[in-house]
Amino acid sequence: MTNISLKPILLRNKFYYFKNFIIRSTVDVSKMSQQQQSYVTQKNAEGFTPEEEENLKSLLNEDWNLLEERSAIQKKFKFKNFNEAFGFMTRVAMASEKANHHPEWTNVYNNVDVTWTTHSASGLTKKDLKMAKFCDDIFKQL
């Protein structure tokens, strides 16, 4: 039974309902009534390929959180010191500028909180997945 209070993410014509990083249920859009479809808004304008679906699942397994209330992914990174945290942010900032896709983030000493979402699409897109993976890759290098 679908818990309608969970916010859905549309992946390949199915809405996935996540809670605590686990897919709780799915709903096939083709089996939804017009009223149900209008109730559940599409959070991804571009659509995900099967590979991108797997990338999202992989990110959720790597401590990224799905922010149910706004269709975004978020992760808290902890570094040895401020210098390491700032170096991470600098590398992400340079890649973000090149990709013209920028994170929402905060930094307090050795902690960096990063959130990815695409405002123009009102939710997650493949750009967010790519940049989140980039963050993980940079973090593993430090």
Image: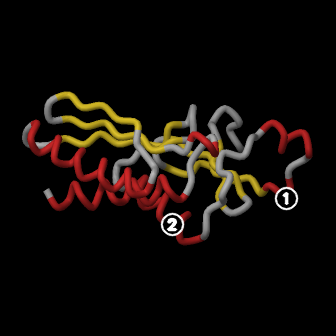
Amino acid beneath label 2: Glu
Circle nearer the N terminus (1, 2): 1
Vertical comparison of 46 with 40: above or below: below
| Colour treatment of the image | secondary structure
Q: In percent of the image, x 38 and y 51: which residue is there?
A: 97
Q: Distance between the residues labelled 1 and 2?
A: 22 Å
The three-letter code of the residue at mark 1 reads Ser
Viewport quadrant of the N terminus = top right
* Residue that numbered label 2 is attached to: 54
Q: Where is residue 127 in the image (x, y as percent from the top left)?
A: 50, 56
Judged from this view, the residue extending furthest toward the bottom is 51
Residue occupying the far top of the picture: 108
Residue behind mark 1 = 30
For image coordinates 83% across by 44% down, the residue present is 37
Mark 1–mark 2 CB contact (< 8 Å): no
Q: What is the quadrant of residue 99 in the picture?
A: bottom left
Q: Where is residue 106 in the image (x, y as percent from the top left)?
A: 30, 31
Q: Which of these two is toward me, 67 or 3?
A: 67
Left or right? Give the position of 44 relative to 118.
right
Q: Which mark is residue 133?
A: none
Q: Which of the two residues, 4 or 123, is positioned nearer the viewer here?
A: 123
Image point 77% across, 57% down: which residue? 28
Q: How crowded is mark 2: few (under 14 residues within 10 Å), some or many (20 or more)?
A: few
Q: What's the residue at 61%, 69% (across, down)?
A: 49
Q: In which quarter of the image is the C terminus?
A: bottom left
